[in-house]
Image: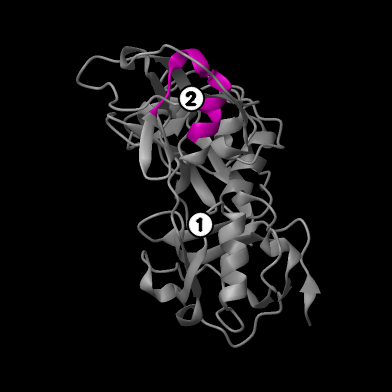
Amino acid sequence: MALLLSLVLGSLSGVQLVGGDHRCKGRVEVRYGGQWGTVCDDGWDMNDVTVLCRELGCGPAKVTITGTLFGPVTPKDQKVLLQMVGCDGTEESLSQCEADDDVFNCRHDEDAGAECEFLEIVRLAGGPTHCQGRVEVKFGRDWSSVCKAGWSFAATKVVCRQLGCGRAILTRRCCNKATQGQGDIWLRKALCSGQEVRLEDCLSEVWDHNCTHNEDTWVECEDPFDLRLVGGESRCAGRLEVLHKGEWGSVCDDSWRQAADQVVCRQLGCGEPVSLPVRRRFGRGHGRIWLDEVKCSGSEQSLEQCPHRLWGYHDCDHQEDVTVVCKEQ
């Protein structure tokens, strides 16, 4: 039975392309019913890819392809959540298209894939990772530096979000001759609130300036955020670890409440947290303790949105490592 999905796939956190060499190419995954899953290629066509590319803020649709081309291989416990997606190509998001969530006779070797044009309009250049560097924006084929006088920390938040990085850390004036830009300097101010998804969503105004490249803007974002539960019998139970600077580390249970459990379970695509009289232990962690004094309201979409001490600052040992048990979906 076909139904109209509403408020399910309507945000960028609810649809993604994975396994490709850029964010606009890969296997189609949707967040539906609190979990991430794939889309069956039955009925999947260029109209659907057109809407998907539009929703992701990518360029025009290029091709519909099989999702089996993209690694890593789909986990066995991940479900095929939708089939017979039926967009006419004019919708703004997949949430406005008809689809069938009663999936039958569709395996992961029928996962849908897609490729859109990748329109890179902002980047951080000259830094150690793609999440740190000198801000550059693109017009046509040319990249331009951005003057610090026309930039704000709110715009930095938007860039970090658009590049798939973690939270904005700082924005400052740079640069020495080794890291400063060449050529044009951006002639507009970015008037951002900090809540926009992309820099192009911000208002802008033409700005006459006399900046030089030693006033180029330097931005630093946290690394992309990830978490996992280890030591349990499934991915939905175990000792909590978070990824920072390429290294997994524990979380201290000071100020940790069930609201934080809810955020973790939701982010992992698991069911509700389980309250146990004596919480099961999953062994002590080793090495880094990355987070302490994490205080969630329970409404956050990601643990990184919860207030906490600075990364790596704590007064804990591994006897206080957080463990979380969620229901299986």
Which secondary structure, mark 2?
A: loop
Helix, strand or loop under label 1: loop
Residue shown at the point (43%, 18%) measured from the top left: 147
Seen at 55% across and 26% down, the residue is 155
Residue 150 lies in the magenta stretch: yes
- Of the pair 98 and 242, the residue shown nearer to us: 98
Q: Mark 1 highlights which residue?
A: 59
Q: Amino acid at mark 1?
A: Gly
Q: Is residue 164 left or right of residue 72?
A: right
Query: 88 and 275: which one is in front?
Result: 88
Query: What segment carries the magenta color?
Result: 145-160
Answer yes or no: do the residues labelled 2 and 1 have beta carbons within 8 Å? Answer: no
With respect to residue 115, does 315 lie above or below?
above
Is 295 on the left-hand or right-hand side of 164?
A: right
Residue 202 image position (x, y, % from top left): 62, 32
Residue 261 visible in the picture: yes
- Badge 2 amino acid: Leu
Q: How many residues crowd around disc 1 within 10 Å: few (fewer than 14), some, or many (20 or more)?
A: some
* Foreground of the two, 262 or 302: 302
Within the magenta stretch, is there residue 67? no
Q: Which numbered disc, 2 or 1, marks the residue closer to the eye?
A: 2
Pick out the residue farthest to the bottom.
105
Quadrant for the N terminus, please. bottom right
The residue carrying mark 2 is 187
Question: Where 87 sits versus 23, above or below?
Answer: below
Residue ID at (43%, 55%): 118
Quarter of the image that includes the C terminus: bottom right
Q: In the rendering, at what x and y percent does residue 314 appear?
A: 45, 17
